[in-house]
Amino acid sequence: MATRLVKLTVLTDFTCANCCVGQHELLNAVSYCQDTLHLPLQFEIEHLPFRLINPSILPDDCTKVDKADFLMTHIGKEKFTKMSDAVSKWAEEKGIPISFRGVMSQTTRAHRLCQKAYKLGRQSKQIPLMCAVFKAYMEEGQDIADINVLAGLAESTGTMSKEEAIKFLESDELEKEVDSMTNEARSKGITGVPMTIIDGKWAVSGGQSSDVFVQIFKKLAVAGSHNPSSPFSGPVADTVLVA
């Protein structure tokens, strides 16, 4: 059976706990399909930036505010409590210490660095850095708007040296590109993340479980490399969101 290439384009933001959950679940699904099910699929994953918090509200170098306090003010106490409870339940089940401790960070610099990683080595560079940034922010409560924090993550994941990362982050390289990608996503009606685009055709919204992705990937494997049919059982709007 011929191997089918599956392109996964994931719009995400590091301030989003559901994006962190979705990252874990998607990568677990990919690993399970390849290493356990041995499906005839090859995955190409690219993460694109999305900013949930407007830079005018939260600049990179703003006076730091407590993450939980900021979110309660920004989205409301009731919505924050519901989200926090759901994330805490998932974290406890998975043994991954996601929390809302630490300061609120604007994610422009982190997105720029992750786009640079993709340019340097595509998913082999971008995914480890993405995971490291999520871990630093969601598990360790670090400030990922801090250039030194990001530079340390770049070095520890082999993206580039700390000195190279600092030089890059102190420049404006890829800043316009990150702005453009975020604005383009919003212009196409995307207001929340994570959003996973499969083969540029089918959109899966929200932090879905790995089981959801596994079922989709199984259908893609059965369809083969030339069948363009939707992997979804029900009606899905086949809107191309990413060129």
Image (cartoon, helix red, strand yellow):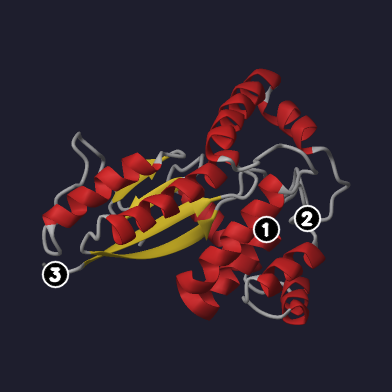
* Marks 2 and 1, the one that precedes in the sequence: 2
Near mark 2 (Cα within 10 A), the count class, few <14, some 14-19 or many ≥20, is: some
The residue at the point 59 percent across, 33 percent down is 92
Near mark 3 (Cα within 10 A), the count class, few <14, some 14-19 or many ≥20, is: few
| Residue 57 relative to residue 40: left or right | right
Q: Circle 2 is placed at which residue position?
A: 60
Residue 34 picture location, percent across and down: 31, 61
Q: Circle 3 is placed at which residue position?
A: 2
The residue at the point 73 percent across, 27 percent down is 72
Residue 200 visible in the picture: no
Residue 43 picture location, percent across and down: 33, 64
In front of the other: 156 or 178: 156
Q: Which part of the image, by quadrant, shows the C terminus? A: bottom left
Q: Which dot marks residue 15?
A: none
Mark 2 lies on a secondary structure that is loop
Q: Which dot marks residue 108?
A: 1
* Marks 1 and 3, the one that precedes in the sequence: 3
What is the spatial separation of the Cα atoms under label 2 and label 1, in whole angstroms? 7 Å
What is the spatial separation of the Cα atoms under label 1 and label 3, in whole angstroms? 40 Å
Query: What amino acid type is highlighted by mark number 1?
Result: Thr
